[in-house]
Amino acid sequence: MPTITLKNTVYKNKLLLDFLDHSTKLSPFHNGSSLEIIDEHFMSNRDLHIDQRKFLVNALVSQYNSIGVETPSGVYQLEKKGVYTVTTGHQLCFMGGPQFFIHKIISTIKSCQLLKEKYSQNDFIPVFWMASEDHDFQEISHTTIFGKKFSIEDTHDTIAVGRLKSSVFQSLHEEVKEFFKTDEKFKILEDLFEKAMSFDSWSKTTRFWVHHLFKDYGLVILDADDVELKKSFKWAIEADINEKFVHRHVKETNQKLLDLHYKVQIDPRELNLFYHDTSKRERIKLEDDHFKIAEANYDKDSLLNLAESDIDRFSPNVLLRPLYQEHILPNLAYVGGPSELAYWLQLKSTFDHVNIAYPILILRDHFAFMSKKQLQQWTDNGFLKEQLLEDSDQIIKNMVKEEMSEIADFNPFYHQLDEMEKELSTLVSKQDQSLIGAVGSSINSMKKALANTEGKFKKSIKRKNEQNIKQLLKIQKQVIQNNSLVERIESFISPYININDYIAKILMESDPGKGDLKLIIN
């Protein structure tokens, strides 16, 4: 399988690059970036008490019961000591959104398989953490399939997306169905999404189709917007209200990273909590000596009383959520994208402060898809696979330059003009020094005329190669478009219906944590 490094090409963030290269400067900010670091001692420190395990299993069973499917066996395995999780998470994107939604889950499943090979006496459960409490509707309300974008114009950027009615997405669902109405390959996915849309909430809809897509691979899906799970984390919510501990420790870490000349991903708020009312997810703001939720004001005691009575209405933000996750799971590693790992590096001291075990951080897999014929055509034109990530204008320049060097090199002609200028200048200077300027002017005019001819010649070559250029740029667009990897743009549906055993194939090629792009050739 061909691979292309993403380091210093697509990924240029020094913090991420040093993390992937195991820089000792970053050692205080994480526990490692490879599954190889996990040993029996590491696992034992992340084991949960049997009562915590039963509590987690009961919550998960209840969640699966809510959509009427059989609870995965992995859920019940979590009740036993010595069983651990590897976790990833993502927004509840319509039909999965971009491909890397799937790639994150694949990387998590593969991580568990690799750990099982090493520690056969233990079991490792892949977990997908649904970001059901996020309220960025624009992030989830669109997808691109075979280059066509499907999106909802309305906005619902107020309520947690998991609590949205699935009917909000019905028009989008119908639009995709119409697009595929004559495509039999889409039938399996169409039936799956059709059944998923019958559930009342977007959280249940997402759980249903993701479960059925990965049910043969042991994936467990967790919705953290769960009153019972939040009760177990109430102490941390109260601690953030009382001590603002997340703000304090992340600020200290940020300064240390800045002192090492890194850019930080997130600047913490004084309070890292949201509040769900009947129709909105509002940020809880600290203003002077009181707390504010929308237009309502609370002193500390009244806000703590609210947390005591209505904990399900409290919601952690992006910096508090990882602590919530690691508190309720026997988790060994978190699989994330580059931006996620960057902000996890800001959190190690916060975890330490509240005595929650910090996981290994694993960069997810990156995949692109092309045919054997396309890759052959690319290399037959003299390009390396690494050049698939080059700017498209540079690709065209390289093609023109290559043919120009084969057909004609104009540099000798410019050199001849330079020599002519020297000889003429020497000649006229013997007669009249004032004529030297006229010689330079004449030669410059000739150079401009030559440059004009060279430009026309290049355009002629481009016209002659226009079809070939179009084909090569089309191949490149299988990998990258507008400086963004296609996996961040195009839906998984495209390769799913074109590649036999799509999930099994990319799972076989999965090798998370490496910082490269894997080309799946079919």
Image: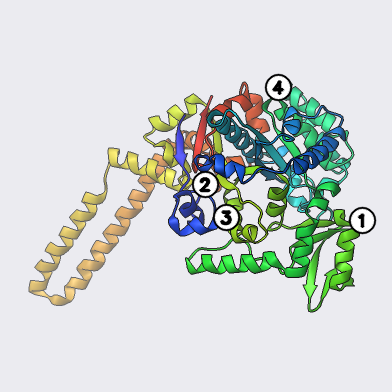
The picture quadrant where one finds residue 109 is top right
Q: Residue at x 36, y 34 (%)?
A: 382
Nearer to us in this view, 230 or 217: 230
Badge 3 vs badge 2, beta-carbon distance below 8 Å: no
Which residue is label 3 attached to? 342
Q: Nearer the viewer, mark 3 or mark 2?
A: 2
Colouring = rainbow
| Residue name at image x 43 percent, y 41 percent | 387
**Mark 4 or mark 2, earlier in chain:** 2
Q: Residue 236's x, y, as percent? A: 75, 59
Amino acid type at circle 3 is Ala
- The mark that comes first in sequence, 3 or 2, is 2
Q: Which residue is tagged 1?
A: 278
Q: Disc number at residue 185?
A: 4
Q: Nearer the viewer, mark 3 or mark 4?
A: 3
Separation of residues labelled 3 and 2 (CA atoms): 12 Å
Q: Earlier in the sequence, mark 1 or mark 2?
A: 2
